[in-house]
Amino acid sequence: MSNPMKHLKSSSQDLRDLFEDSITVRHVAEKLQSCQADEDASVVRRRMDQLDFDVLGIEDKGVVYGYVGRLSLESGPCRRYQRPFQPRELIAESMPLIDLLPVLRAAPHRAFVQDRKRVTGIVTWGDLQKIPMRMLLFGLVSLLEMQLLRIVKDFYPGDSWHRSLNGKRLEKAKKLKAERQAKNEALDLADYLQFCDKKELILKKPPILDCIGFNSSEAKKHLRQLLKSAENIRNKLAHAQDIVTGSSWPELIDLARKMEALLEKCEQTKNE
């Protein structure tokens, strides 16, 4: 049986091309709800409390020209509390989803979406829970796991990784392979390694750490934490769980950036 990992063609650039060409801010944005400039601020605040909205667009003569924050509203007309849209808060509806991450990381929890120079939508950190962003994160972590397996096979020739893996973990892989053999679906034993197994094999091989630039003790500690975080987000995504539980949106955005950077390093790593 041919080994599909020998011809691994999916790459970080393939994933980026997919999301740059096909999946944009439009797929996660919500319509920006608005209030009228002459509406009473206390009434609007109660409405925002009921809807659990932090901001509303402020509209006059059919044009949304700014926004109001719930916590700032007291009494009098809403125009008294209007804030102008800042350039750093504005993004195009056509912006690739993968480029939204650093924008949200820098913006105060949200970005406003422009369509033909009119502000029509809003994106918040909560929108990162939607399917398009989950697809992006799962794509990143899946490609990373595939590259880790390729590197293990490359740097542990002849299944020499057996000696470096915990005995119980090796038996787990053998059991999974036996189950697949019964269905005539068996691959190499290494293909049944779990993410945690690949992580440990990578960390135990100094030449691998040298190649990907994590050869110091401090760098190795950072790599261990990064791979642990990647494994955690993979499990949350696979089981349709809340991906930010136990973390924060800035941390999750940073994790995505770090996974992409590590993936690029792994793609360039070969055992000469």
Image: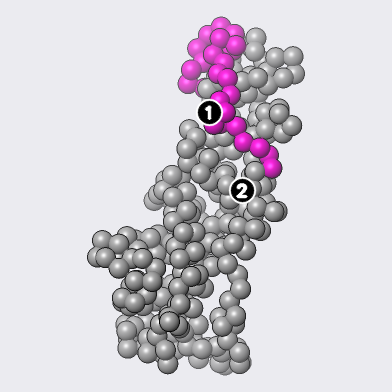
Is 268 within the magenta?
no
Q: Which mark is residue 150?
A: none
Q: Is residue 267 above or below residue 180?
A: above
Depth check: give the residue in front, 41 or 165.
165
Query: Of the residues tagged 1 and 2, which is closer to the observer?
Result: 2
Q: Which residue is mark 1?
A: 54
Residue 203 point in image, percent of width and height: 33, 73
Is 93 within the magenta?
yes
Q: Quadrant of the C terminus?
A: bottom left
Residue type pointed to by label 2:
Leu
Q: Quadrant of the N terminus?
A: bottom right
Depth check: give the residue in front, 82 or 182.
82
Instruction: Tell me which label, 1 or 2, sits earlier in the chain.
Output: 1
Query: Alpha-carbon neighbours of circle 1 within 10 Å: few (<14), some, or many (≥20)?
Result: few
**Label 1 to label 2, Cα distance in Å?**
23 Å
| Residue sitting at x 48%, y 54% | 256
Query: Alpha-carbon neighbours of circle 2 within 10 Å: few (<14), some, or many (≥20)?
Result: many
Residue type pointed to by label 1:
Asp
Q: Is residue 124 above or below residue 266?
A: above
Residue 107 point in image, percent of width and height: 49, 35
| Residue sitting at x 32%, y 84% | 164
Q: Which residue is mark 2?
A: 97
Residue 151 point in image, percent of width and height: 45, 77
- The answer to whether residue 42 of the structure is visible from this angle is no
Residue 140 point in image, percent of width and height: 53, 61
Residue 66 placement: quadrant: top right
Magenta segment range? 70-94
